[in-house]
Image (tube, rainbow, N blue to C red):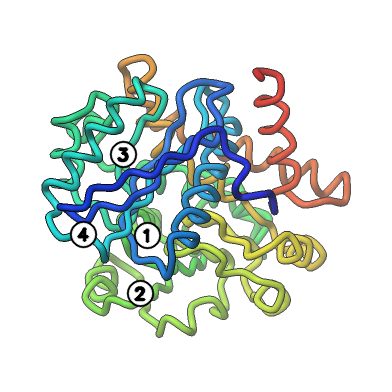
């Protein structure tokens, strides 16, 4: 959905001249509980671009947490990676600042963050996720994607079969989430098409089973049943929505739709869309529940994502709107009720 990206509860700039640290820590909402969100290390054209990304991602986390029906809100940390000079010192300063927030921001990894980065930050704050206790968070996201694909399979294939055997799926991006999704798809007998800008990762994926590698610019137009964008957001705009050949979109990326018009066009064409803040919440469910109750979210709790996605799709079809709009309305209602 399109919202004001700067309407956030707290915005903090964290800087350290010696290390080159220049970061934004944004808490969009803590109405339901502490703000959960990862730390993203990326290059930005300007401070404003970094801030807007942090605010938009933090807001998306609010709706993700609310839609997942647990007591947490949304936050995000964005670190301008190209400005770092002494990474170790920068991580220490960042960890110390997060600790000063006294648990209002609970964090883990995101794009550009290494396990080493996260473990170092955890030496400075109790608000960093315990990687050893949570396991593979990319696979946690994949569990939700696979459960949703299985639930939608009868609607997107001619045979009407309710398993993944023979289902044609295009996976864009082979990072932790994309690779785990390919691995699970192959284990269930799906036909998979993949693309990544990193040829080595594509080669690894091709060895997992029935996997065909295509060029990055060809993956969106692949003739498949399901398109799974697992890299950057905004990959489906109005033009793409009009030409997409897949009959469903089930992705691990955040903010898959470039704008609301893309979602409307998908609905008009009968392409099923699993709202990203619903379907890719597996890592949040696993990690947030560990932070809140000392026990990581289970595979079954993550797989329940599929039920919520299908409910949004069904209501959207009955009401003539989009699944994203329904999912957002439900999440917003929970946040408002707690405010």
Q: Mark 1 or mark 2: which comes first in sequence?
A: 1
Secondary structure of the residue carrying tag 3 is loop
Quarter of image, res 286? top left
The answer for how far apart the CA atoms under marks 1 and 2 are is 10 Å
Secondary structure of the residue carrying tag 2 is loop
> How crowded is the residue under tag 3: few (<14 C-alpha within 10 Å), some, or many (20+)?
many
- Number of numbered tags placed on the structure image: 4
Q: Residue drawn 37% across and 43% down?
A: 38
- The residue to which callout 2 is attached is 196
The answer for how far apart the CA atoms under marks 2 and 4 are is 27 Å
Query: In the visual, does 10 lie left or right of 99?
Result: right
- The residue to which callout 1 is attached is 178
The answer for how far apart the CA atoms under marks 1 and 4 are is 28 Å
Quarter of image, res 300? top left
Q: Nearer the viewer, residue 47 or 291?
A: 47
Q: Nearer the viewer, residue 208 or 144?
A: 144
Q: Quadrant of the C terminus?
A: top right
- The residue to which callout 4 is attached is 84
Q: Mark 1 or mark 4: which comes first in sequence?
A: 4
Q: Residue drawn 37% across and 78% down?
A: 212
Q: Residue drawn 68% across and 63% down?
A: 259
The picture places residue 5, in percent across and down from the top left corner, at 61, 50
The picture places residue 89, in percent across and down from the top left corner, at 12, 46
Circles 1, 3 touching at the beta carbon (< 8 Å): no
Circles 4, 3 touching at the beta carbon (< 8 Å): no
- The residue to which callout 3 is attached is 108
Nearer the viewer's eye, disc 1 or disc 4?
A: 4
Circles 1, 2 touching at the beta carbon (< 8 Å): yes
């Amino acid at each position: 959905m399109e919202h004001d990206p700067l309407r956030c509860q707290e915005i903090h700039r964290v800087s350290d001249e010696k290390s080159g640290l220049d970061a934004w820590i944004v808490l969009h909402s803590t109405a339901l509980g502490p703000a959960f969100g990862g730390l993203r290390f990326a290059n930005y054209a300007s401070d404003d671009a970094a801030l807007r990304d942090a605010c938009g991602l933090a807001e998306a986390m609010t709706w993700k947490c609310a839609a997942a029906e647990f007591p947490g809100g949304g936050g995000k940390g964005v670190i301008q990676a190209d400005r770092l000079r002494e990474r170790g010192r920068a991580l220490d300063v960042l960890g110390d600042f997060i600790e000063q927030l006294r648990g209002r921001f609970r964090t883990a990894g995101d794009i550009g963050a290494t396990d080493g980065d996260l473990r170092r930050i955890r030496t400075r704050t109790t608000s960093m996720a315990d990687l050893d206790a949570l396991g593979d968070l990319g696979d946690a996201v994949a569990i939700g994607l696979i459960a949703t694909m299985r639930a939608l399979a009868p609607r997107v294939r001619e045979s009407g079969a309710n398993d993944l055997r023979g289902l044609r799926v295009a996976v864009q991006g082979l990072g932790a989430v994309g690779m785990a999704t390919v691995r699970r798809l192959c284990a269930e007998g799906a036909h998979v098409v993949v693309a990544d800008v990193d040829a080595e990762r594509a080669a690894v994926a091709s060895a997992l089973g029935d996997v065909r590698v295509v060029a990055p610019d060809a993956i969106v137009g692949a003739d498949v049943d399901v398109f799974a964008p697992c890299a950057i957001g905004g990959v489906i705009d109005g033009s793409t929505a009009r030409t997409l050949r897949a009959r469903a979109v089930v992705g691990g990326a955040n903010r898959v739709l470039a704008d609301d018009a893309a979602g409307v066009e998908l609905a008009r064409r009968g392409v099923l869309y699993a709202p990203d803040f619903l379907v890719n919440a597996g890592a949040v469910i696993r990690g947030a529940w560990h932070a809140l109750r000392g026990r990581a979210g289970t595979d079954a709790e993550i797989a329940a994502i599929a039920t919520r996605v299908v409910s949004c799709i069904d209501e959207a079809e009955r009401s003539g709107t989009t699944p994203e709009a329904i999912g957002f309305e439900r999440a917003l209602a929970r946040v408002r009720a707690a405010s």
